[in-house]
Image (cartoon, coloured by chain):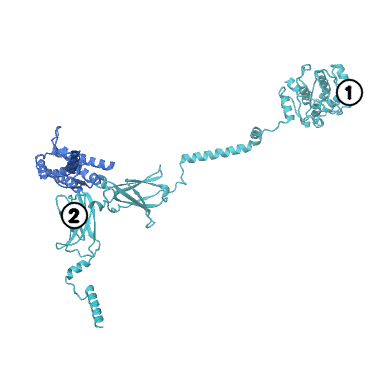
Chain colours: A blue, B cyan
Amino acid sequence: MFHVSFRYIFGIPPLILVLLPVASSDCDIEGKDGREYQHVLMISINDLDTMIKNRTNCPNNEPKVLKKHACDDNKEGMFLYRAARKLKQFVKMNNSEDFNLHLSRVSQGTLQLLNCTPKEDNKSVKEQRKQKSLCSLGILLQKIKTCWNKILRGSKEH
Amino acid sequence: MTILGTAFGMVFYLLQAVSGESGYAQNGEFEDAELDDYSFSCYSQLEVDGTQHLLTCAFDDPDVNSTNLEFEICGALLNVKCLTFDKLQEMYFIKTKKFLLIGDSEIHVKLGGKNITSKKLNIVKIVKPEAPFDIRVIYREGANDFLVTFNTSHSQKKYVKELMHEVAYRQEKNENDWMCVNLSSTKLTLLQRKLQPDAMYEIKVRSIPNANYFQGFWSEWSPTFHFRTPEITGGKMDPVLLTISILSFFSVALMVILACALWKKRIKPIVWPSLPDHKKTLEQLCKKPKKNLNVSFNPESFLDCQIHKVDGIQARDEAESFLQDTSPSQLDESEKQRLGGGMQGPIWPSEHAAITPKAFRGDSPFGCLAGSISMCEALVQPSSRSPDCREGCKNGPHVYQGLLLGPGTTNSTVPTPSTFQSGILTLNPTAQGQPMLTPLGSSQEEAYVTMSSFYQNQ
């Protein structure tokens, strides 16, 4: 009995402390009502999607993009943060001005709506450098769109 | 005293320093500049030229010396930190695609690189839409209304798509009497009855963002459109409607005239039938078997007939002799007198007006039996001497026969007698063979003729 109480006193609190960052969200999302996303970001994402489809025919097997990160529950903010930072890598000189501006708007606008504590910057930068094809960009944009919809759906339910 | 004087001196000194009339200010230029009102206002126009946006700023005070002043915007920009405005006369503007459209920006007024004043604003909250155009008014005669349509360039834009429009119209002669209607679509219907007929109107429209995400100011008014309302159509009616109304009026008038003309003869007898006149009914019944009979209760019809008053005793003797000659029918003396009296014609109906009630009293009925009827016939015969009224007098006794019974039907059975209450002569034959000369009562003028014989004759 003494051993059981010892376990509870000294075992569980550290466990909670370790798991707390995993369970909690690192980012605060300001645009949860969806107005910024619906009136600005979504327009740019749709325009980019149209431009990508006009320029390339992407294969059925989707390239892996942000495979280590997903729009999990309580992780939406962090996913969007990483995705927005990755979008910057797709800004190139050989893209049209409108294309680059839309990319920048989605990236910068998303980051402006998030209040995140940056983590794992080095690893995410390396990963972003590897995948710069337009098909990857298209998939990334779809994931961003899906994650935003999930956030807005969740805010409506609450 | 000294202290008081010193205090007053210091007060005056401070007043001078504050007013600055002595030219004490160290940095006169800047202080002069700070005294000017550098307040300004801006508005944005999104996608005004393709994908380019326009931001325009101007000082509120038009007297501000803006010679060396610059405007700069920082924040909420794509890929850059700040952008500098261009100047056109007294207006500062910037045309760029690099607006983020999320978050606030800061606009700085600078003089020689130094920041004079700043203002924080959000570009999506100061949007001024472009003015609508191509406003038109079409009169729809079938619906009696005016269809107002106009166009706006924002229907093709991506960002500011939802607008609220305000349509203003007025009669040209009424200054400052604008009627306003708000709508979110580009079509409006104005009812004709709400406008003055045969009047000239002018109409214009402007827009404002629909206050969802983008907000801002009213646009400029569209160019004014003029239209005239049609005249009152009261004097000009539809020809078909006019024809129908005239025809219906005349038909109604005709029906009224016919109703008035035929009221007594045709309509009233049907609607309010009068009680049958016994005399006329009798005449009608008599006319049926023999249409050429002169049946009438009017004594004037028998003026041509020579009617002689028969003496009572002589009548009785004649009657008896007649009866012996023809048939064993029996007549009461009073009945003879009655019959004789009945031949007087004109006086006859009035004398026997009260016969029928006596019949109902159960007096011994006098019945002109078949035989007695022939007696009657015999009595009546002398009256047919006059050749002038032969026809009529022939009809008289014939009628009498018709009234009593048909010729040659003396022995026919007599149905149940029916009597009129109005005092018509009733013939009440009895088949029981009652004595014909049975006295009927005190009145010798009474004569009973029953209606049953009429049915027999028919």
Task: Classify residue B228 as left or right of residue A154.
Answer: right
- Does residue B87 appear in this view? yes
Please, is residue A128 above or below residue B205 in the view?
Answer: above
- x, y (%) of residue B293? 74, 25
Q: Amino acid at mark 2?
A: Ile
Q: Pointer 2 indicates a residue of which chain?
A: B
The answer to which image quadrant residue A139 occupies is: top left
Name the residue beneath numbered marker 2.
B94
Q: Pointer 1 indicates a residue of which chain?
A: B
Task: Estimate how packed mark 1 is, as few (under 14), some (14 to 19) or many (20 or more) residues with alpha carbons within 10 Å.
Answer: many
Name the residue beneath numbered marker 1.
B316
- x, y (%) of residue B224? 32, 52
Q: Amino acid at mark 1?
A: Arg
Q: Which residue is nearer to you in this view: A146 or B383?
A: A146
Q: Nearer the viewer, mark 1 or mark 2?
A: 2
Local secondary structure at mark 1 = helix
Task: Classify residue B279 as left or right of residue A26.
Answer: right
Local secondary structure at mark 2 = strand
Viewport quadrant of the N terminus of chain A: top left
Q: Residue furthest bottom?
A: B1
- Does residue B127 appear in this view? no
Q: Which residue is nearer to you in this view: B418 or B154?
A: B154
Q: Which residue is nearer to you in this view: B173 or B342?
A: B173
Task: Estimate how packed mark 2 is, as few (under 14), some (14 to 19) or many (20 or more) residues with alpha carbons within 10 Å.
Answer: many
